[in-house]
């Protein structure tokens, strides 16, 4: 038998034709002598009817069970009136079988494939079966279409796909790396790349002008939230373009992908927001602009008040007091406010002060309901109402702490309240965030660290600044943000050797370490490196958003769990003594075993 069609694609156009389908038994129903089988393949389901008139075929049908693989030949006919299924492409037709062959039986699967309440552990343990489910087939097909769209766009714009090594060298670029021991070189290690950053820069120095790669990157970080130890980037680098020109080409890529994959026209052009403005207005460098709420700056105003909580934060050198007005928020219950208070505590906030604006014309204890009103003068209260533009029926939340805590807490609260109170607009809200600081202070190590990575160029005019005032230096770095997610980030790179060396020095990388770790880069920069820059998009997140799923695990065929395990194959797993010996490695007793 030779397959003629995919199950999910047989429809009215095939009426009267003989088709041969091959797929899996999704469901089998006995209906008083007639057997119905929903046959499934990657394109969907098709109803096949087995009639006792054809004794041999019918006998085969009787032995079918879920997940058997079968080939069926039959005639396409309309479904009887009243039995059509508008949810299926093949919902108006059925195939009357006149031949069937079992290609392979199946043992009973551990779950029903259309069970929507499976635990993720079960799904990941039985990933092969899980991937057979139609939503997963749809997600991975969408991922393919997104990749193809990106490839077509990049190819049309002159980008060349060049592979870079996976066995790389350990370099201090930010994240913790995975190490791979070398068998041949005793005691030496490769590192898996956090990204192909320096290879793509060196490809520019090698004259390829435009590069791209859809590439795996590896970061050995705690898998907070929705991260994977290995993930995929659309990685891009260009030569001789300005920051603005790079952003234009990359915006075109995002536009094209959304158009190709979802038929969606994203706003054109994307709005552009400076990092400082984003932090001031949204408390976040990846604001979800579907939520129209903004923070109100109150730091200066609170320098005048006696109320300790606000005053102390306002007087701190890196303190901030800000407000978030929630329209209609006066209807929030005590319990809801308590829940929001618990929520901001996750971000380090000590509490969540609020004022319910019952009557905005009375900015005092009569019109305002709040545990803090009695500590604030009528002038200050009036000023708060004016600045937040709060109206009767609104509720104002306050954050007062170190600026980082206020931004993290109110920034997250803004998005949460906005979505939960139905204030968010539907659709897609992309933006560019630009003018990032070049460095950020690493409180733990008491040093300056590169905010993007140490190869990012300072803004024009800031080349000298970073030696004097690292905190005030801005970088030619940019992020693409979509609905509150950073979907891509990049920068113009340093292409002068002396500037690169100075940035390394500002990051407290000694001249010896610079040579040892980055000698290859410094050398390449000294042989005529062109101005260059690029970006990388987080492909997993982008696809998850397009697919409308919350977790990137749902758009990755074989993902790891939050604990970095592959439950299907059982990785990681111990190595044999012989393997370890080959690699010159001795496993230390674990901390637990040592203290036991
Ligand atoms: N390599 C950077 C990253 O992975 C992106 C870039 O600067 O192009 O974040």
Image (cartoon, rainbow, N blue to C red):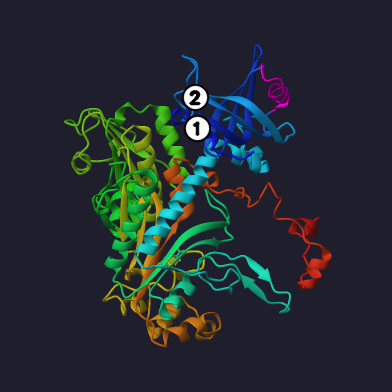
Instruction: Mark 1: give few (<14), some (14-19) or many (20+) Cα within 10 Å.
Output: many
Q: Mark 2 points at which residue?
A: 93
Q: State left or right for residue 170 relative to residue 364.
A: right
The residue segment tinted magenta is 53-65
Give me the residue at 22% from left, 36% from top.
390
Residue with the most extreme top position: 32
Q: State left or right for residue 440 relative to residue 387.
A: right
Q: Quadrant of the C terminus?
A: bottom right
x and y percentages locating residue 132 in the rendered image: 60, 39
Does label 1 or label 2 sit earlier along the sequence? 1
The residue nearer to you, when weighing 40 against 535, is: 40
Q: Main secondary structure of the magenta part?
A: helix
Q: In which quarter of the image is the N terminus?
A: top right
x and y percentages locating residue 443 in the rendered image: 47, 64
Q: Name the residue under label 1.
A: 10
For label 1, the SS is loop
- Tell me if residue 551 is in the magenta stretch: no
Rounded to the nearest angstrom, the CA distance separating label 1 from label 2 is 8 Å
């Amino acid at each position: 038998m030779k397959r003629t069609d995919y199950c999910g694609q047989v429809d009215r156009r095939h009426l009267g034709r003989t088709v041969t389908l091959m797929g899996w038994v999704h469901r089998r129903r006995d209906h008083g002598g007639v057997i119905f089988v929903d046959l499934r393949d990657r394109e969907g389901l098709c109803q096949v009817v087995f009639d006792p008139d054809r004794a041999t075929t019918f006998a085969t049908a009787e032995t079918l069970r879920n997940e058997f693989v079968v080939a069926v030949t039959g005639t396409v006919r309309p479904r009887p009136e009243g039995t059509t299924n508008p949810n299926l492409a093949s919902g108006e037709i059925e195939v009357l079988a006149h031949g069937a062959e079992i290609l392979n039986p199946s043992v009973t699967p551990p779950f029903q494939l259309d069970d929507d309440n499976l635990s993720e552990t079960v799904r990941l343990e039985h990933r092969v079966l899980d991937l057979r489910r139609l939503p997963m087939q749809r997600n991975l097909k969408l991922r393919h279409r997104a990749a193809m769209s990106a490839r077509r766009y990049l190819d049309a714009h002159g980008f060349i796909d060049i592979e870079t090594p996976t066995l790389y060298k350990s370099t201090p670029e930010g994240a913790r790396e995975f190490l791979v021991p070398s068998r041949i070189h005793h005691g030496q290690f490769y590192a898996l790349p956090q990204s192909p950053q320096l290879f793509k820069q060196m490809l520019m120095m090698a004259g390829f002008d435009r590069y791209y790669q859809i590439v795996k990157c590896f970061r050995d970080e705690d898998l907070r939230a929705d991260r994977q130890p290995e993930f995929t980037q659309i990685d891009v680098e260009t030569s001789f373009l300005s920051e603005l020109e790079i952003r234009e080409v990359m915006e075109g890529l995002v536009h094209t992908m959304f158009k190709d994959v979802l038929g969606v026209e994203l706003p054109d052009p994307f709005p552009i927001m400076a990092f400082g403005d984003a932090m001031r207005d949204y408390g976040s460098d990846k604001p979800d602009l579907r939520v129209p709420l903004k923070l109100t700056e109150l730091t200066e105003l609170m320098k005048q008040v006696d109320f300790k909580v606000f005053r102390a934060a306002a007087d701190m050198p890196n303190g901030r007091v800000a407000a978030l007005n929630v329209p209609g928020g006066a209807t929030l219950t005590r319990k809801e406010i308590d829940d929001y208070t618990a929520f901001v505590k996750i971000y380090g906030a000590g509490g969540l002060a609020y004022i319910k604006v019952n009557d905005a014309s009375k900015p005092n204890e009569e019109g305002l309901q709040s545990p803090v009103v009695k500590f604030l003068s009528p002038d200050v209260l009036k000023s708060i109402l004016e600045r937040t533009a709060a109206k009767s029926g609104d509720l104002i939340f306050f954050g007062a702490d170190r600026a980082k805590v206020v931004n993290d807490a109110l920034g997250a609260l803004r998005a949460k309240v906005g979505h939960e109170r139905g204030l968010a607009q539907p659709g897609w809200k992309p933006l560019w965030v630009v003018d990032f600081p070049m460095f950020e202070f690493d409180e733990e190590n008491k040093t300056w660290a590169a905010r993007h990575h140490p190869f990012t160029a300072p803004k024009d005019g800031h080349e000298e600044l970073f030696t004097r005032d690292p905190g005030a230096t801005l970088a030619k770095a940019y992020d693409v943000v979509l609905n509150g997610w950073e979907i891509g980030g990049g920068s113009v790179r340093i292409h002068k050797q002396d500037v690169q060396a100075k940035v390394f020095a500002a990051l407290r990388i000694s001249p010896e370490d610079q040579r040892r770790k980055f000698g290859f880069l410094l050398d390449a920069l000294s042989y005529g490196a062109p101005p260059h820059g690029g970006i990388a998009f987080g492909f997993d997140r982008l696809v998850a958003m397009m697919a409308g799923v919350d977790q990137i695990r749902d758009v990755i065929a074989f993902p790891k769990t939050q604990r970095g395990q592959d439950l299907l194959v059982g990785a990681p797993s111990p190595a044999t003594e012989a393997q370890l010996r080959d690699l010159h490695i001795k496993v230390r007793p674990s901390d637990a075993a040592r203290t036991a």
